[in-house]
Structures are given as C-alpha cells and as structure tokens.
Image (cartoon, helix red, strand yellow):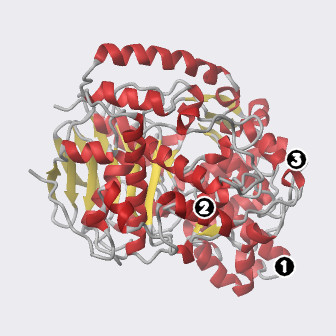
Amino acid sequence: MLGGYWQKIAVVDLSAEKVDYLYPAEEDLKKYIGASGLGAKLLYENLDAGVDPLSPANIMICMTGPYVGAKVPQSGRWELITKSPLTGIYLESDCGGKWGPALKSCGLDGIMVKGKAKEPVYITIVDDDIQIKKATHLWGKGAFETDKLIKEELGRGSQSICIGQAGETLVKLASIMSDGREGRAAGRGGGGAVMGSKNLKAIGVKGSKTPSIANQESFDKLLDEIRTKTKDVHEGPLGTYGTSCAVEIFNDCGDLPIKNWLWGSWDKARMVSGQRLAETILKKRYHCSSCLIGCGRTVEVPDGKFKMETGGGPEYETLGMLGSNCLVDDVEAIAKANEYCNDFGMDTISVGSAIGFLMEAWEHGMISAKDTGGLEMTWGNGEAMVEMVKKIALRQDIGEDCSQGILAAVKRVGPASAEFAVHTKGLDFPAHDPRGRGGLGVAYATSNRGACHMQAYNQDFEGEGCFNIADLGYDAPMPPYTNEGKGKFVADQQHFMSMMDSLKLCKFSVFGGMTVGPMTQFLNHITGWGLTNEQWLECGERIFNLKRLFNTREGVSRKDDTLPPRILTSPRQGGSGDYVPDLGFMLRDYYRARGWDEWGIPTPETLNRLGLDQYDYRKGPRTTENQR
C-alpha cells in the first residue's frame, strides 16, 4: 500500500441506492496529489458541461489528502468539490474540524455522491460498512441537533457533516457543517444546497484504521522541527486572539470591508476585533484535528437579547462581513448572527455581503419595510442584521431573493443596485479589499470559484510586517499598493495554495515554517516518492489549470475575470490612499506568466507541458478509466 493513501474512494449512488469504489492509480496521485487536485480531476471527468448544479446529475466529492491521518500539524481537513449552484462554475470549499481524519480512518481517501434519493437520507460509514439510511428523524433539524443525533447513534469517536434547514430548502448560500456547536464549515458557494438537492442530510463516519508512512524516522525528525516552529504561532496573536487578531491592522492598511466597501477606515474597528472578543464573550480556544495553533474561538453570551449557549464564535471573515461591513459594532449581535448561520448552515461571508447590500439599498430608498418584513435595515442595526439572517435562511420576504445570491438580490432591488453589489462571477467578496492589497485584484478576478482570498492567499504576503516565501522566489513581502509583478506573484501563490488544498493543510501552517521545501519533504517521507520542489510546484500549476479548464468548458473566459465598479474606480482613501488596482495591467502580466492566451484560456503548449492536453476544450473532454 502506498504511504499516505488508501487508493480507495467510495462512490455512493443515491438514485440507485448502490455503493461502488474508485481506485486511483499511483500515477494520478503523483500528478494530482489528492483532495482539491484529485477532486478536480474526478469532477471534470464525471460531470458533463452545462449540468444544472441542483439536478441529480451533479456530483459532490468530499476528499482528504495524503497528510490527513499522518499527524502533520494543521492537516486535519477535507475538501468539498462540486459545481456551484451560486455561480454555476467550479466549486471547492475547505473545512477544518475533525471529520476529515475520521473519514480517512475508515480506509477511504474520499467519497463521491451521485444522484438523488427518493426521500431524505443520511449515509453512515463505519470502517468498511457503508449504509444509506432514512433521515425522517433528522430532516428539518438544525446542524447542531443533527450532529448530536448522528454522534449518539455511531458512538464515541464518530464525526459527521450535515446541512441545516438552509441546505434542505436549497438556499444557495448554504454550507455543509461539521463539529456541532463548534461550527466548522465548508462554507462558500452553496455546497449545502447541492447536498440538500440530493435529499442527503448528513454523512456520519467512524473508523479504526491508520494509513502507513513510508519513511517514519525521517518523518518524525521533520515533524519535531515543525512543531517547534509552530509553537511560536500558538503563543502569538493568531493563537491568542484568533483570526480576528488582525482586524485593526487591516483597518489601518485599507483591507477591512467597511460600510459595504465604501469607507477607508472605521474608528470602531477595535469593537469587532479578536482583542474585544477576548475581553467580553470568549470562553476558550478551539483546535481542529492535528492543530497546534488553536485559532478557533468558543464564545458564550449568557443573557440579553443576543443570548447564546457556548459554541463557535465569529472569526475574522464573519466579524468583517457581519460587523464592519454593516457598521455593526456589537460583538454579541455578530456572535448571535454567526450562531444562526452555523445552525441553519449558511456562509457568513455571503450572508454578511447580502445584509450590507440591503443596508445600502435601504439608505438609497430602494427598499422599504414592506420588502424586509418590517425590519429597518439601517447601518449598524445589529438587531435587524440578526433577524435578516433568519429571513435569508427561511427564505422570507426579501430574504428569499438574498437566499439565491447577490445577482438575485440585484434583480429584486433594481438594476441601479448592481453598482454596489460586490462580487466576482457571482461569489461575494470575502473580508479583504484589493484596494488595500493590490494582488487581491487579480487573485479575485482569476480564482476558479469566484472572489476568493484563499486560492492565492496573498493578503498576508503584501505589505510591511507581512511574510515572505523565499523558496517561491520572494525574499521580501510584496508592496501592497502597486500593480507591477502582481500577476506572476499571484500565479505563483495559486500553485502553492493548490498544493496546500490538495495535501489538505491549513494555510496558517506557513507561519510555522511550512513552506515549499518542508511540504515536499513531508510528502516524500509519507509516500516514499522523491519529488523535487520544482515538481511539487508543477503539480500545483497543473491542478489550477485543470480547474480553469472546467470553467472554460462552462463558458468562462477573460470577460468574466473582472472586479466590481466600486473596487476598480473608487479609491478608499484611509490607509490605502488613492490606490485602485489596474486590473488590465495585472491580467496581462498574469496571463503571460501562466501561458494563457488573450482570452484567458490555457494555450495548447501550456496544456501539453502540464500533461493536460486531453482536457483541451477545443478537442472536447476525454474520460479516463479510474477503476480497476
């Protein structure tokens, strides 16, 4: 058996009520690694172009990678790969918590779900036993109770992923949730709606198997080195205050979303910071499986109008999108809205974007209490923000339109509102501004799932005090308010992050010394391979290009690689001054660095170099045989 892999993926056909298996060849694993990369290959080869994402023909793939189960620090993750109902293009969504390693312990690298059940069901996997069961007792329940019931059924050591009511009713902002009240989420792009469209409520897993490691002694030596370096991150701001430790820093440099991306700075930024959480409602830190950092927050609001039990607290993206983006400075209100999102099962980023959009529409007189069910959507109104979260989840009043995404909300409010709908390819911006970190402009424009800060993750590598990655060829952080060199920089980062998403490694690992060299070494020690750093990065390039080819097949080209008018034409002032990204300049640099043509499509020469010529849209797809 190849170290780090089971070479086995379960295929559950809900329509046929049948379980089968795929057995990936080692050659494919070397080229696509796992999780995001192998998942993209499977999605491309098993899904026809033009399929309705909410039809039974769509497939959802939940994948681990070779690091999962090997106790590499920060590797307890899994990846959702499917076609997005929100954007109609490629979707991957990363999730921490404890479910990924539990799935791997069942002797599986992943699970592919096809078809649609005749009635609500859930799947249980206990080592080699996979069952499809009726979910009558679970349907209609929130994610917290569903998780509790699954774990009670399967017993100690079990874990589950599930959808709440938002996924059941096909809210296109719906997430797939895990870890109960701790609220880990495969959040972006509507993966929960795909699961709901299949009448699939949950997947519970419990296993007893451990994947092998080819070179244990070398692995253990490197593990000790990385653990020592990661200790500093655990004891630093990220561990102490969580992801929101940087709220005030991002406010100062022009990266924080404020008033639906209108303002340059906010004098109340500290009120929604990690430091403020620590002073008020923080109860303890939360660690995902194999994590040495512990950036997760567990909070409690014991009484008052936003009372909530102990559970997962808001992280940076949530505090940015439901807080500063809406001018809500009450962390208790944000925590309550976050709790509703976790239990109903919704993406806090897109929900916060929708509410900021509604508040600006309210300010301009484009909507009224008649549209909102009586809520006054004024800036900073925490109570209205919390109630609107419920309306979006339950598809009530204007929440019905928001539940179908920002483009549906624009259609309801009116064409002029498109001017302040902040998205790319239908996916709302996360809580980082390209006017404060210039590379984010080309990163958002070219991300394969729409506006995404994680596919390049360059916001922490631009500006004073940021990190540099010498083994990518960058000996110093990139300057933030410039366009020069950003296209190639983003392409390099996308290769790097494609590998992290395929190995299944938390992005925060880079702060503990996990850059290209150590990641390649870990992979070689686990598998027994002998990949060089250059071969490792080429895998990342291949993976990113394959995802682009999936989107090209769906009609995506340069016309779609763009940013909203507010970001391209309106300087923030504040910390970022008059800077706006020159997207045309950066895209030219980016396409040249990638070997893409003027339409933003990989050239035949690039595809041939990467071994992807069989996926050239000009020739049509060719399916390869994965079973043996």
Residue 176 in picture, x, y percent from top left: 45, 53
- The correct choice, above or below, for 570 with respect to 539 in the image is below
User: What residue type is disc 1 on?
Assistant: His
Q: Are marks 2 and 3 in contact (CB under 8 Å)?
A: no
Q: CA distance from mark 2 to mark 3?
A: 38 Å
Relative horizontal placement of residue 202, taking residue 134 as reference (left or right): right
Residue 567 location, quadrant: bottom right
- The kind of residue tagged 3 is Lys
Q: Is residue 328 visible?
A: yes
Q: On screen, 162 above or below 199?
A: above
Question: Where is residue 169 shown, x and y percent of the image?
Answer: 46, 68
Residue mark closest to the camera, 2 vs 3: 2
> What is the C-alpha distance between the residues marked 1 and 2?
39 Å
Residue named by callout 3: 268
Q: Give the number of the disc on residue 449.
A: none
User: In the image, is residue 235 above or below residue 244?
Assistant: above
User: Could you give the CA–CA distance between mark 3 and mark 1, rounded to whole angstroms?
Assistant: 24 Å
Kindly state the secondary structure of the residue where label 3 is placed: loop
Label 2 neighbourhood size at 10 Å, few (<14), some (14-19), many (20+)? Answer: many
**Image position of 235 (left or right of 191):** right
- Indicate left or right for 533 with 263 as reference: left
Please tell me how crowded label 3 is: few (under 14), some (14-19), or many (20+) other residues with Cα within 10 Å: some
Q: Position of residue 84 (x, y in %)?
A: 44, 66
Residue 58 versus residue 4 in the image, above or below: below
Along the line of sight, the residue nearer the viewer: 603 or 53: 603
Q: Which mark is residue 364?
A: 1
Which residue is at 50% across, 68% downward?
A: 171
Q: Identify the residue at image location x=68%, y=68%.
A: 422
Whether residue 61 appears in this view of the structure is no
Which residue is denoted by mark 2 in the rendering?
589
